[in-house]
């Protein structure tokens, strides 16, 4: 299990949930990323510097945030992350496959568009590959 930093609650540190500032692009410095930190036990992204489509210059000793080269589609020929816990990862995909028929295509698409962490994107990309797009 990936150890989570000892910090105050999300509501007390919500101001750190920012994009475009290198100081708030890591598990230990961004409250929003910490909420999703448990996914690191399932999926290891290319980098733990969160870009989410936004770059930022280095600042106050924090490295620059550069755009990821990963498309979000597993095994698309580009370097991507790595499944760390295959059983949980597959169970998550299987759950989505079995529960998704009750969701309209629009709901599935909105779910894909709202995700902001590599694990979720990887799982949904795998889901899309198995199910097909709407």
Image (spheres, helix red, strand yellow):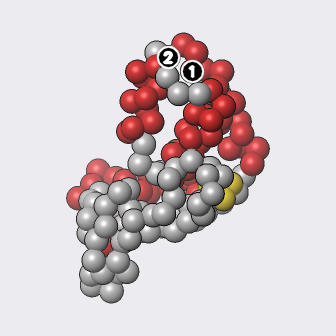
Dot 2: element: loop
- Extreme left residue here? 15
Estimate the x, y position of residue 54 in percent, counting from the top left. Answer: 31, 61
Residue 23 placement (x, y as % from top left): 30, 73
Say which quadrant the N terminus sits in.
bottom right
Q: Mark 2 points at which residue?
A: 103
- Residue 65 picture location, percent across and down: 36, 71
* 101 in relation to 110, above or below: above
Residue 6 appears in view: no
Q: Is residue 50 above or below residue 39?
A: below
Residue drawn at x 47%, y 26% as measured from the top left = 108
SS assignment at label 1: helix
Give the numbered dot on residue 100.
Answer: 1
**Residue sitting at 71 percent across and 36 percent down?**
91
Q: On the rendered structure, is 95 left or right of 63?
A: right
Residues marked 1 and 2 touching at CB (< 8 Å): yes
Q: Is residue 11 visible to the viewer in this orientation of the structure?
A: yes
Residue lying at the far right of the rendered structure? 87
Label 1 neighbourhood size at 10 Å, few (<14), some (14-19), many (20+)?
some
Res 114 → quadrant: top left
**Nearest the eye: 75 or 87:** 75
- The circle on residue 85 is none
Instruction: Tell me what residue is drawn at x 35 percent, y 77 percent.
Output: 64
Which quadrant would residue 22 be assigned to in this image?
Answer: bottom left
**Measured from the top left, where is residue 100 in percent x and y?**
57, 21
Question: Does residue 70 lie above or below 125 as drawn?
Answer: below
Q: Residues within 10 Å of mark 2 (few under 14, many from 20)?
A: few
Q: How many labels does the image show?
A: 2
- In the displayed structure, does residue 54 sit left or right of residue 87? left
Q: Nearer the viewer, residue 70 or 47?
A: 70
Task: Give the residue drawn at x 61%, y 52%.
Answer: 76
CA–CA distance in space, label 1 to label 2:
5 Å
């Amino acid at each position: 299990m990936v150890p989570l930093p000892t910090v105050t609650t999300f509501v007390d540190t919500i101001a750190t949930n920012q994009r475009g500032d290198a100081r708030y692009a890591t598990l230990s410095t961004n409250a929003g990323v910490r909420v999703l930190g448990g996914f690191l036990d399932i999926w290891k992204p290319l980098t733990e510097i969160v870009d989410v489509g936004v770059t930022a210059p280095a600042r106050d000793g924090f490295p620059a945030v550069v755009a990821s080269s990963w498309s979000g589609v597993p095994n698309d020929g580009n370097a991507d992350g790595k499944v760390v816990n295959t059983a949980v990862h597959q169970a998550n995909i299987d759950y989505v496959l079995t529960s998704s028929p009750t969701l309209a295509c629009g709901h599935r698409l909105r779910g894909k568009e709202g995700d902001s962490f590599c694990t979720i994107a990887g799982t949904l990309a795998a889901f899309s590959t198995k199910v097909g797009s709407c």
